[in-house]
Image: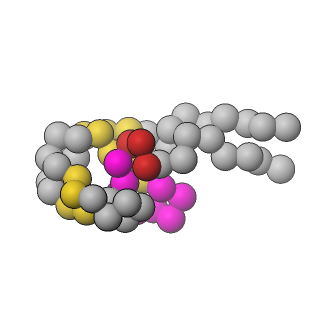
Amino acid sequence: MMVYLPALYHGIMKAKFKTTCSECNAPIKSGEEIAKNPAGKWVHKYCAPESEELP
């Protein structure tokens, strides 16, 4: 059974500061939508997994 979780555990927010996406290594600009990945790192919204299979 596949259970869909909202795009990320901590939700999506807008970046307050410039940083680098830990998934694709591209820059994250202030104001871009970001989310935390399962490792707790900030990534672009589109780099974050949108669903996870639960047992």
Identity of the residue drawn at 27% across and 59% down: 26
Q: In the image, residue 8 lies at what x, y percent?
A: 50, 44
Q: Main secondary structure of the magenta part?
A: loop
Left or right, 35 with reference to 33 = right
Q: Is residue 15 magenta?
A: no
Left or right, 12 with reference to 28 = right
Q: Is residue 39 magenta?
A: yes
Task: Work out whether 3 lies above or below 17.
Answer: above
Left or right, 7 with reference to 33 = right
Region rendered in magenta: 37-44
In this orientation, does residue 9 appear? no
User: To which quarter of the image does residue 40 belong?
Assistant: bottom left
Q: In the image, residue 12 lies at what x, y percent?
A: 38, 39
Identity of the residue drawn at 32% across and 64% down: 25
In this orientation, does residue 2 appear? yes
Q: In the image, residue 10 lies at what x, y percent?
A: 45, 45
Identity of the residue drawn at 62% across and 41% down: 51
The tally of labels here is 0
The quarter in which the N terminus is drawn is top right
User: To which quarter of the image does residue 21 belong?
Assistant: bottom left
